[in-house]
Image (cartoon, coloured by chain):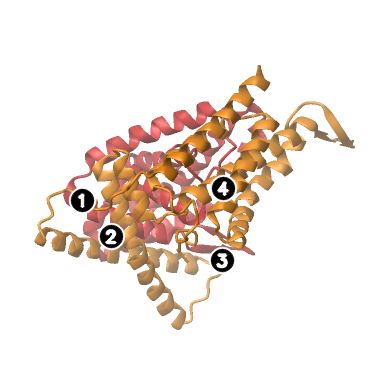
Chain colours: A orange, B red
Amino acid sequence: MIEEPFASGNSIIHGIDPRFRVAAATFYSFAVALCYQFQPLIAALAVALVSVLLSEVGLKTVFKRLVVVNGFILLFWIVLPLTYKGKIVYSLGPVNVYLAGIVFAAKITIKSNAILLVLISFIATMTFATLGHTLSRFKLPEKLVFLLMITYRYIFVIQQEYQKIIRSIKIRGFKPKTTLHTYKTFAYVIGMLLIRASERANRVYNAMRCRGFKGKYYSLTYFTADTKSWVFVTIVFGVTSGILLMEFLING
Amino acid sequence: MHLSEGILSGPVLFSGAALAVAGTAVGLKKLDYDRIAQTGILSAAFFVASLIHVPIGPTSVHLLLNGIVGLLLGWCAFPAILIALLLQALFFQFGGLTTLGVNTVVMALPAVICYYLFSPFINKNQVITIISAYACGFFCVFLSAVLVGAALMFTEKNFLEISMMVVAAHLPVMIIEGFITTFCIVFLKKVQPSMITH
């Protein structure tokens, strides 16, 4: 159910210092989110495709992820051409299809997919634990990083608890339907999950205190900024700045 | 409830991020070190529970549970939800870096509002508990849908129809979420009352 399919690998991208990848992905994502012209957006999509290829992630899994996200975008393709007032390209009785709506939906689609692909190739190629250590290097509040690590640590444990409860209700012949009984059962499953989580948390906290927990979470991971990381980050920042420049030049 | 990457405008993204930072800062300030394990493991439980698909007619919906998150965690809902969204971005690529702020506000702000509105009534007698828990679950999802709609509207005034559709489409989720919140709170009150008395 919960897994990190892109996190392990030996590609060029996997070998780059995670701090540089986080910085590059953040800069790229915000820059592309601010673009509204076709030329910079297509350039951005090209950059995203190249980076996915460089990260050597399973293209089948990438495709599955894209399908899910584009499901939401599909809503814009259905609604915007009918409601985004502007030049009419086609009319069928009282229904008008507007050009501006189609153009806008197309831009959203390119932008969304480009940002998503870079997220997959730069960030999803590290484990959440690595991301946590990276964020602590970016001087995020210690409490937040600690909370992040402990949540990640226990998701898999809680998931097993969840599967245990689901197994037991299945053995008792539970079949989900649209009935109040189903909602009651799921509510009790959630309630039980929360109680078990809370009791576990007390035990975990006591164990931490026994081991001398002083309210600080030590990160023992060391990152090394080697030449290829610097080259990588320079290229990404350079290309992204180029895309931004293109946007400003076309926009006037 | 997620807004995908690439839809919202710059000003909306940045104001969302600013609000999320402020909310998270308050949440972290209220979070003592001896509560971090509790909050972290509970938010892991919420993360897992939000993957449950509840049937409704021929399809199914997944739960938001931000009403219960609000009642149990109060202001700590902000950091807990921020982390859950970051995990979702990394595991499933739902949402992403630029929309992280907006999506956190969409989910966590209603949780905090509902915490203030409804938590005083949760420990009253059975009838008041049931009514306020249902209202909490329903209203929290409603507020989230309205915030999604508002984010779309501030991006582009032509998004009016889509915004209305988002709110309308979540009506069944609001009803179910109300039931789930009610049953869950009544259950917790019976089995582990210490979890909801602050």
Give left or right: position of B104 versus B59: left
The residue positioned 9% from the left and 62% from the top of the image is: A210
The residue positioned 29% from the left and 58% from the top of the image is: B41
Which residue lies under the disc numbered 2? B189
Which residue lies under the disc numbered 4? A51
Q: Position of residue B69 (x, y in %)?
A: 36, 50
Type of amino acid at the residue the image marks with label 3: Thr
The residue positioned 15% from the left and 60% from the top of the image is: A208
Which residue lies under the disc numbered 3? A178
Please check whether the numbered discs 3 and 4 fall on a single chain.
Answer: yes
- Total tally of numbered discs in the picture: 4
Q: Nearer the viewer, mark 3 or mark 1?
A: 1
Q: Secondary structure at mark 3?
A: loop
Q: Position of residue B165 (x, y in %)?
A: 64, 42
Give left or right: position of A103 versus B61: right
Which is more toward the observer, A141 or B104?
A: A141
Q: Chain of mark 4?
A: A
Type of amino acid at the residue the image marks with label 1: Tyr
Q: Secondary structure at mark 1?
A: loop
Please check whether the numbered discs 2 and 1 fall on a single chain.
Answer: no
Residue B132 seen: no
Dot 2, how many residues are within 10 Å of its Cα: few (below 14), some (14-19), or many (20+)?
some
Cα–Cα span, label 4 and label 2:
51 Å
Task: Single out the residue that lies furthest toward the right.
Answer: A93
Name the mark on residue A218: 1
Which one is earlier in the sequence, the residue at label 1 or at label 4? Answer: 4
